[in-house]
Structure formats: structure tokens, C-alpha cells
Image: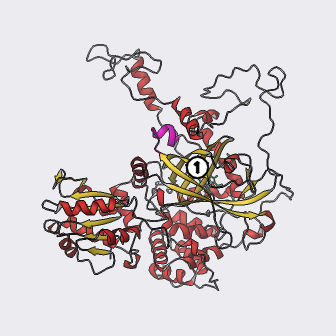
Amino acid sequence: MQSERDAKDRQLDEHRVPLDDHTMTTDQGIPVDDTDNSLKAGTRGPTLMEDFHFREKITRFDHERIPERVVHARGSGAYGIFELYEPLGEYTCAEFLNDTSARTPTFVRFSTVAGFRGSADTVRDVRGFATKFYTGQGNFDIVGNNIPVFFIQDGIKFPDFVHAVKPEPHWEIPQAQSAHDTFWDFVQLQPESLHMVMWVMSDRAIPRSYRMMQGFGVHTFRLVNAQGQGTFVKWHWRPRLGTYSLVWDEVLRIQGNDPDFNRRDLWEAIERGAYPEYELCVQLVPESREHDFDFDLLDPTKIIPEEQVPLRPIGKMTLTRNPQNFHAETEQVAFHTANVVPGIDFTNDPLLQARNFSYLDTQLLRLGGPNFTQIPINRPIAPVRNDQRDGFHQHLIHESRTSYAPNSISGGCPAARDGYRHYQEKVEGTKIRRRSPSFEDHYSQATLFWNSMADWEKRHIVAAFLFELGHVERPPIKQAVVAHLGRIHPDLGAAVAQGLGLPAPGGGQVHSRTSPALSMTGQPRSVATRKIAILMADGTDAAAVTTLRQALEGQGAVCEIVAPREGTLGGLPVDRQLSAASSVLYDAVVAADGALLSASARAVFFVLEAFRHGKAVGAVGSGRQLVEAARLPNDVGVIVGDDIATAFAEAVAGHRFYDRDVSGVPA
Ligand code: HDE
């Protein structure tokens, strides 16, 4: 089968510069004989202006950076393919959503929002989940997040929100953190942000991995079928491995140990062939049901609870290839909410409408002109023919003698026909700067979120509010936020107030509805791709380690041997030396030696810290002594014995033992 993916690959091939043994040249193709010494008048003399190689090299270096994204500056990308389960002709005429034999190439960029390009991956923040589908009818982008709602209802507030969350203007502090006055000042004055704030204070905002994170289109979009009939749609990505998060104390330590934690995790999984998979699901709402909800479908601060409109899986995306050049691919990729193909359309969500303006505008600045769609990562595989011309960095040599329509000289070509047809929505209204009253309720869904959390999730949310508000300097801002929290739920308000030493806020009546799908409990369980540290030292029983390792790796886990020194132990290569390792970089730990390691404070701390972060801790052979030295209590997640493989794998698959109360670590 000649797949569409091959088409994108072939297109990219034209632009690849392979590593080879060719002679170095200048940008003009002139061979270079020396790139280490500038041309000088005598060995100790001044550098000469005529050294064109030197000047070109330095000039190119001076111009290497392009403006980083105002938001979502830090990101990681990967190529994939999308395969459809069943034709959706009843709802949409988009060809890639009707052809189950198509393998539509995709490029995904995951990102954080607030931090600069060099900030750490594992900050508390919403994550971007942007996908470009290179379809036969042109590029379609879902520019989504890992949280299904947004902070604001109208795009005109976006600059205010972003200015509030970014580092404060006078001293550019703090980096990649919402824990500061301007963010919480915005929140207290803009209660429409509260629902999203609840999500951001939950563990959703500290994902374990981009491979274990949901994605959401956020807005209500519209599918349109061949008869021109519309259906409202919400986009959801569901990771095959389940949705899992880190714990806050761990996050603080990962930032120093490996600021590239999520980027590295994605890259290494793809290199290993453990291809991340996400199911694309839709919530479909017939137009006749538009007003059946107690919220407005156009309001991006609201979800459609899954219990009201179930998710329908329609296809699967598999990420199969890492980029070869970060700048060319991940940095230059340009997503846009308005990149839609026939059969997919917008709604009047005022946030979406603003985005439809913003993304093209930002690309013009960031990528230096209107021809950024010719950059290989952005080029559609569908043919591009129009009368748009010139501009900076035009790569195409248009041979036509005309660049206008209508024309007779070129036989009327390119001709506009049978193309994208906008949904025929009837629109009328009075010009007005006001929101619909149906956008007014800012609390009910925040309450729904709180009500739906498991106890451990609630504890983590309270701890997150305490961390964040604990960094706010102005007491009136804290008080105002706590008052809002009391309106979301009296328990939440009281718990946060107590930690801040404030009186419990008054709270009115709140509803007790829940939406079980909002909780992260009950995720698919698997040990596959989980990273396990095996602590060894000289004299460890290597055969026992090998047996355990084979059993775990047989189920797809990734084991690393951590030991006091590099080299080999009992014939097994050491992957990481203890001084360069930390438990926070692993999902679980096995103590395989106790005789030597229980005398090492680092090794004892390694095991203790893993335990405190709720991880499975195993011990084989003398490893039992290390567990004893760490004084771990009797716990279901501490598995000691000679044949622990099955029980340990089961414990790792459950991700964490949250009954240990990891919200307030260290205890
Ligand atoms: Fe974005 N957003 N956004 N955004 N957004 C950008 O585009 C903007 C919003 C999202 O990996 C920018 O190329 C406005 C919601 C992602 O390259 C910019 C508004 C959601 C990415 C921009 C929003 C997103 C961006 C910055 C309010 C979730 C990264 C650089 C009206 C559904 C894409 C760029 C990538 C990037 C504007 C709100 C997601 C400035 C004006 C809601 C994942 O154009």
C-alpha cells in the first residue's frame, strides 16, 4: 500500500542534509580549507574584513535564534500516523475521517505554557497537545491541551491572563510558575478561571509522561456532512497507557535532576520502539440538543460530562518517529486552529474565534514572513496552488504568467471550485460587547470537579493551593481566593484557609453531583515502559537480579542498574552511578543489595524517598537489609522475598500507593 505517510516522508527527504564525508563549504558552496583560524595580517595581526568565511560563519551564528513562542515556548515533537476505526460519513465529509485504509501522517508537539524555552519540563502547568494531520485534503490541526477547559471565556482576555501568569514585569520572577501574586490576583478578579484553576491545582498539571496524558480540543467544534448538516463535536485524545501523574515533592526534585524529564521520556520511548498511542475520541451532540445542557456549549470553561455524552473512540494515533533536527521540525512547526479541512468547522465560541485570528499572526512574526507554510514540517502533502506570491524566503519558482483571478491567460487557473464550504450558519445580532448570560455560572463545574476527586486527589489539590498561595505576598489576594474556594466547596475552602491561618470562608449551598470520569483513579494498569531502578553493589547476587530483570523486561518495563560505581557487577553493566542517580527519575525501585548499600546514606535515602513518593519498593536477597535500614513500615507496596517478580510488577502497574499520603512529603 502506498501510504500517505510515505508521501510526507518522501517530501521531507527532499530537504534532508545527511551526515556524510563531504568537504565543508560556505553557504555559497565554496570549499573551505580552514575553519579554526580567521584570516589575519600576520599570525599576531588584525583579522581581515575580506575573510568571507569568518564573517558568514559569525553572521549566521548571530542570527540562529528565532523568537520563542509567547506561550508554549518549551515543547517536544514527534511524528506519527493516524488510523481511523470506522467511516464517519454520517457526521463529516472529511476524507481522512471516512477512509479506514488511510494512514494519515501526523506531527505532534507537546509543551508547557508559562515557562521560557529553557525552563524545566515538570512544572505545574497545563500541557499543550497540538497535532497536525497531513491529510490528502490539506492540513488539519487540533491545537489542544491536556486539560479540557480554559481560564477565560473570551479571547480578548488572553493577553491579560498570559501577562498575569508569566514572570512579573519588574524582576522577571518567577520562571514557569503560577505561584505568585499577579496570577492569583487575576484569578480572584476573574472567577471564570476557577474551573481551570481546579484542574491546574490537581495532579493533571504534573503529568508523569507525555505518553500518559490526555488531550482535549477544549472548544466545541462542528462536523459537517456531505448534505451540509452540522453536528457539534468535542475532541479527546486518550493515552493507551492511561493517565498518570507525578507527585509534587517529586516534581520539585526532578527539576534539578533532569529538567528535560518529559522530553527525554518521550524521545527514549520512541527510540526503544515503545511507540506512544492515543485514541482519538469524540463527543457528538446533534444540533437539536444544543440547548439541552445547564451550561453553554460555546463556553470553553465548561466540559460536557462524559456521563451525559459518552466518548466515542474513532481512531488511533501512534507516535513512531523522533524528529531529526529540533529547530527545523519541532521549533518551526506552526499550528493553527483555523487549519481545518472540508467537513470540519468552527462554532462561535469567543475564545476559538480569537484563536482563529491569533495563530497565523504569531507565525508571521515567529517564522519571519508569509512563506512559513513552505518549511518542510509545515508543508501540506496535498498540492498547493494559488495566486499568493513573493514575500520573504519564497522558495517556489512560480512559472505561471498570471497571479490573479479571474484570468484568461492561464486558462482561468488555478480555479476556485469544489473546495472548502463554510457551514451555512444563520447569524444575526446587535453589535455588543457583552457575554451571554448562559456564560455566567463559574462555580458549578468547579464543584463537580472537586466532588469527583478521590480522597488522595483532594489532598493533593489542597496541598497545591497551599504551595501556590503560600508564595503570594498580598494577604487580600489570598483571602479573596479562599472566599472563591469556599463557594466551590466548603471543605476545600476550610482546608486551604486552615493551612493559611485564615478563618474558614462562608460558603453557600453546593451541589453533590459527580462525574467519575474526572478522577484519575481506575486507569489502565501496565508495567510496560515503567522505569525501575535496581540497586546493586559489589557482591550482589547477579543471577537473582537477572531473573527478576528478565521477568520485568518481558512485560515491557525498563530496568536500570544503579550502583556505587560504574563498570560491571557480576557481569552486569552498571547503567548509572549512585551519585548521578535519583529515585525521582524512576517509577519504582528494587533493592538487590543490603550488605554494602545499607551503609550508604545515599542508597538508604534512595529507597526511603521512593517509598515516600508512593512508589513500589522491592527487595531481593540481602536487599532486605537496605529496606530495613530505610525503616520502611509494613506496606502492601513494599515487596520483599526471593521470588517477587509477579507481585512487584503488579504493584508497579498500579503506579502509586496514595494511601501513604504523599501530598505533604517529606513527612
Ligand atoms: Fe494558544 N497560542 N492561544 N491556546 N496554544 C499559541 O501560537 C492563543 C489557547 C495552544 O506546539 C501561540 O504558535 C490565544 C487555548 C497550544 O506550537 C499563540 C488564545 C488552547 C499551543 C496562541 C489561546 C491553546 C498554543 C503561541 C486565546 C487549548 C502551542 C505561539 C484566544 C485548547 C502549539 C504559536 C505548538 C500556542 C494564542 C488559547 C493551545 C500566541 C490568542 C484555549 C497547544 O498564537
Query: Is 97 on the left or on the right of 539, as rendered?
Result: right
Which residue is identified by label 1?
82
Q: Secondary structure at mark 1?
A: strand
Query: Number of numbered discs present?
Result: 1
Does residue 289 sit above or below 491 in this rendering? Answer: above
Residue 7 or residue 165, whichever sits in front? 7
Residue count near mark 1 (Cα–Cα under 10 Å), binned few <14, some 14–19, many ≥20: many
Q: Quadrant of the C terminus?
A: bottom left
**Residue at x 45% of width, y 60% of height:** 123
Residue 656 or residue 404, whichever sits in front? 656
**Residue at x 36% of width, y 64% of height:** 587
Based on the displayed image, in which of its 4 quarters is residue 432 positioned? Answer: bottom right
Give percent across and percent down for residue 531. 35, 60
Residue 347 or residue 185, whichever sits in front? 347
Let me know if residue 92 appears in the view. yes
Range shown magenta: 321-331
- Amino acid type at mark 1: Phe
Let me know if residue 443 appears in the view. no
Q: Quadrant of the N terminus?
A: top right
Give percent across and percent down for residue 562. 24, 58
Residue 326 sits inside the magenta stretch: yes
Give percent across and percent down for residue 316. 57, 54
Residue 365 sits inside the magenta stretch: no
**Residue at x 39% of width, y 71% of height:** 656
Does residue 413 sit above or below 86 in this rendering? Answer: above
Q: Which residue is situated farthest in the front direction here?
A: 1
Query: Is 625 on the left or on the right of 98, as rendered?
Result: left
